[in-house]
Image: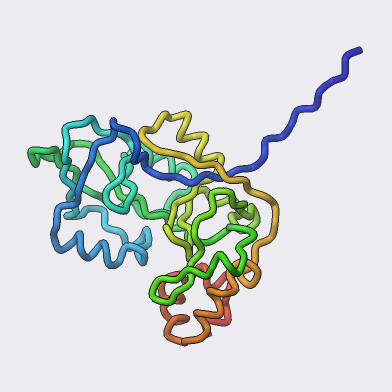
Amino acid sequence: MAAVRKKTEATPAVYLFQADMGTVRRPRFDFVENEEKEKLFKGYKRLTPSAAPLKSNVYAKQQDTKKLCDILPIIGFICVSRRVMDVIEEFEKGVHVFYPVHLLDKDGAPYAEEYFLLLPGHRFNAFIGSSEASWSETVSGKPYAPFNRGGIMSLREIAGRHIWWQLFALPSYIFISGELHDRFEKEKFRYATYDRLVASDIPWTAEEQMGPFLRWAEEDPKRIAELVEEYPDWVRRHRPQWMD
């Protein structure tokens, strides 16, 4: 009798999610300069779903004549169609900010389709194995962790969340769960890239994973106050003493 081969469980994974900058098919847009666009650039990290506008005066003009797609980059942001927004809302309703942006064709005529700048409401760092050396790089003296494509993420820190911004790292990438990745692929959203990272059931602590950053922050009460203002949820979870 032939041996029965056991089914191998797939290794849990998360994905770095980016608009595809390499495909020649993606349309190219640039923001139209105006007061609301400048205000958005200065304050988008502090936006919450309840404070986000239902309408906006932010515009982006197309620089070519290529066909619209579901996911496209606009100078530092990921812009998504309503189809993408609706799928994300199925997974995590009312958690993320979808900032309306009006797309204009090359001649300045508005497109009828709805598009939004994707601003994830979850913001945390789940990478495991960050060494002291990985925090040696700084911007204006502020330590940060460069992205490691071979890194492992903590499933315990992710805690079932499906889309998030990585904090305290540069670039500030967006990551998605394996479940959301699979749904995006099923829907055939275009154009995005997905870099797979292994996720493991390992605990994550700020002391072990980002000690140099914590020491830098605690050198100056003003730094702590800024972090509490910008990332209150993360502070409550990992440095509640900073809230006092």
The x, y position of residue 226, in whole percent, is 41, 78
Q: Is residue 150 left or right of residue 200?
A: left
Q: Residue at image x 65%, y 69%?
A: 208
The x, y position of residue 27, in whole percent, is 24, 36
Q: Residue at image x 63%, y 55%?
A: 154
Q: Quadrant of residue 6?
A: top right
Residue at the far right: name it.
1
- Nearest the viewer among 48 and 10 is 10
The x, y position of residue 223, in whole percent, is 44, 81
Q: Is residue 12 left or right of residue 109?
A: right
Q: Residue at image x 14%, y 57%?
A: 33
Total marks shown come to 0
The x, y position of residue 51, in whole percent, is 32, 63
- Nearest the viewer among 99 and 26 is 26
The coloring applied to the image is rainbow
Q: Is residue 227 left or right of residue 82?
A: right
Q: Quadrant of residue 196?
A: top right
Q: Is residue 149 above or below residue 190?
A: below
Quadrant of the frame with the N terminus: top right
Residue at the far left: name it.
107
Residue at the far top: name it.
1
